């Protein structure tokens, strides 16, 4: 079957699937007051997820990333993982987590079939970490990362949202950490959403500044894989780990877009900052609806815009990143 392609010729081997919009952290850039509005109990069932992923796999999607909110708040998270791993065509199943109880649970995630993990660590300073997230859990997250390595995971990606005056002075600390440790740090440029405009104006830190520092120190940009996320990845001969930069305000950021998103309620989002989604859930109620589901997905791609228009202050319907996992 012909792979998914939009009017700009971009192909989409990568689906980010939110399995809940509930999050138990209070990150200052996303949910500073906690998760007050969510639809956790209404999220897609395991059978609906199976039908959804089966349809996407039939049109060339090979990589699935489970996101939230915090995906591991689903009591059936391991069932979701095992179900997706059995779907023909899916070559890689990744997850993004805030690391809650990761030290206790990561081996269960890996045993269920997770192939790759992104974990949020916005600071290596316990006090700054608690200030950012509302939780004193840095030690358990770092222990969880080590447990994943001990259980055979070859590498882990760590997400850190760069914020002026909060953690922008920690580049050296992160680089020291990965000198002899196979972690890929992802510095993510703070993005403006519907609920954080004042915060964005105060704390936005351009990823370009980190890029300039890396280049000055001899870091070299790596080639991007076909199913990779949006990060520009850099390596250095003196370091076991790598550094990725996600700079959504950079020129031509959207040219290489290769991923689609589905919310926990079954809405196909053509962009993180789309005004609204396309409902797929009515076609997830039986296995006999696969042909119609694929047709709706294909038709929807005709509506995908060239760009997210973030640089113009456009945030679409995205009020906070927990709505669909970033």
Image (cartoon, rainbow, N blue to C red):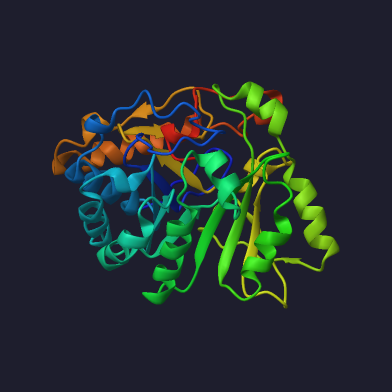
The residue lying at 26 percent from left, 44 percent from top is 74
Asked if residue 98 lies left or right of residue 222, the reply is left
Asked if residue 34 lies left or right of residue 77, the reply is right
Q: Position of residue 247 (x, y in %)?
A: 68, 44
Vertical placement of residue 162 versus 58, above or below: above
Q: Position of residue 202 (x, y in %)?
A: 71, 28
Which quarter of the picture shows residue 44?
A: top left
Q: Position of residue 108 (x, y in %)?
A: 27, 63
- Is residue 257 at all visible to an observer of this figure? no
Q: Position of residue 225 (x, y in %)?
A: 57, 63
The residue lying at 19 percent from left, 38 percent from top is 289
Which quarter of the picture shows residue 204?
A: top right
- Is residue 188 at all visible to an observer of this figure? yes
Which quarter of the picture shows residue 153?
A: bottom left
Q: Give 202 or 207, whichever is nearer the viewer.
A: 202
Asked if residue 82 lies left or right of residue 254, the reply is left
Q: How many marks?
A: 0
Vertical placement of residue 312 versus 159, above or below: above
Vertical placement of residue 216 versus 193, above or below: below
The residue lying at 50 percent from left, 58 percent from top is 227
The residue lying at 71 percent from left, 26 percent from top is 201
Q: Residue furthest right?
A: 216
């Amino acid at each position: 079957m012909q792979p998914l392609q939009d009017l700009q010729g971009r192909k989409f081997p990568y689906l980010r699937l939110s399995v809940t919009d509930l999050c138990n952290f209070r990150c200052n850039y996303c949910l500073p007051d906690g998760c007050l509005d969510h639809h956790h109990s209404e999220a897609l069932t395991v059978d609906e997820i199976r039908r959804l992923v089966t349809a996407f796999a039939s049109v060339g999607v090979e990589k699935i990333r489970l996101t939230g909110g915090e995906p591991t708040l689903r009591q059936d998270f391991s069932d979701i993982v095992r179900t997706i791993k059995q779907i023909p065509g899916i070559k890689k199943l990744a997850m993004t987590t805030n690391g809650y109880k990761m030290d206790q649970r990561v081996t269960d995630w890996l045993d269920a079939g997770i192939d790759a993990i992104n974990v949020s660590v916005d600071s290596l300073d316990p006090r700054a970490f608690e200030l950012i997230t509302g939780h004193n859990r840095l030690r358990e997250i770092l222990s969880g990362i080590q447990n994943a390595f001990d259980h055979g995971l070859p590498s882990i990606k760590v997400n850190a949202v760069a914020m002026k005056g909060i953690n922008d002075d920690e580049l050296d600390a992160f680089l020291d950490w990965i000198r002899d440790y196979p972690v890929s740090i992802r510095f993510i440029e703070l993005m403006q959403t519907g609920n954080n405009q004042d915060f964005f104006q105060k704390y936005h830190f351009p990823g370009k500044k980190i890029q300039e520092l890396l280049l000055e120190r001899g870091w070299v940009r790596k080639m991007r894989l076909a199913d990779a996320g949006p990060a520009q990845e850099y390596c250095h001969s003196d370091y076991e780990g790598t550094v990725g930069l996600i700079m959504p305000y950079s020129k031509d950021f959207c040219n290489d877009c290769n991923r689609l998103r589905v919310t926990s309620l079954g809405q196909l989002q053509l962009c993180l900052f789309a005004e609204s989604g396309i409902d797929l859930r009515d076609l997830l109620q039986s296995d006999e609806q696969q042909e119609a589901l694929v047709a709706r997905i294909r038709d929807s791609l005709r509506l995908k815009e060239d760009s997210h228009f973030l640089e113009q202050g456009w945030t679409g319907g995205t009020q906070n990143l927990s709505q669909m996992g970033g």
